[in-house]
Image (cartoon, rainbow, N blue to C red):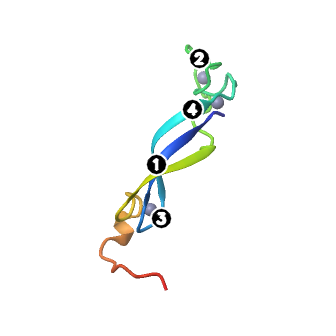
Amino acid sequence: MCCRRSEGVVYKRCTHYVPISFHDKRDCGNRYCTFSAAHPRSCKNCNCEIHWYPDYKQDTVGYREGACSGCFQYFAGRPVINAQ
Ligand SMILES: [Zn+2]
Ligand SMILES: [Zn+2]
Ligand SMILES: [Zn+2]
């Protein structure tokens, strides 16, 4: 399966990395992987791989205040607790 290098931001409150763009695809050359150049465009009844491999590199390009969208609900209404 193909994988990519991502660039993303880290949310300060939950410390999660959230990718915002992807670069430098590494092609796996597998014809059963929909992301590969080897995958036929007119693949019949395509049940091929539709998931990326984890990013081989994650570059943090910035930081954001607050929590990511996945944690926003969890943190909403909770007081900010300083790490002890
Ligand atoms: Zn692939
Ligand atoms: Zn296919
Ligand atoms: Zn989060």
Circle 1 crowding by C-alpha within 10 Å: few under 14, some 14–19, many from 20:
some
Residue nearer the viewer, 77 or 16: 16
**Residue 40 sits above or below residue 19 on the image:** above
Numbered disc in front, either 2 or 1: 1
Quadrant of residue 64 within the rendered picture: bottom left
Ligand 2: quadrant of the figure: top right
User: What kind of element bears circle 4?
Assistant: strand
Query: From where the camera sits, is residue 67 visible?
Result: yes
Secondary structure type for disc 2? loop
Q: Residue at x 42, y 82 (%)?
A: 82
Percent x, y of residue 27: 65, 28
Q: Nearer the viewer, residue 39 or 16?
A: 16
The residue at the point 65 percent across, 19 percent down is 38
Disc 2 vs disc 3: which is toward the camera?
3
Circle 3 SS class: loop
Q: Is residue 5 above or below residue 61?
A: above
Residue 7: image location, x then y, percent: 49, 44
Give me the C-alpha separation between circle 2 and circle 3: 40 Å
57 over 2 or under it: above or below? below
Residue shown at 63%/41% (left/top)? 53
Crowd around label 3: few <14 · some 14–19 · many ≥20 (10 Å) = some
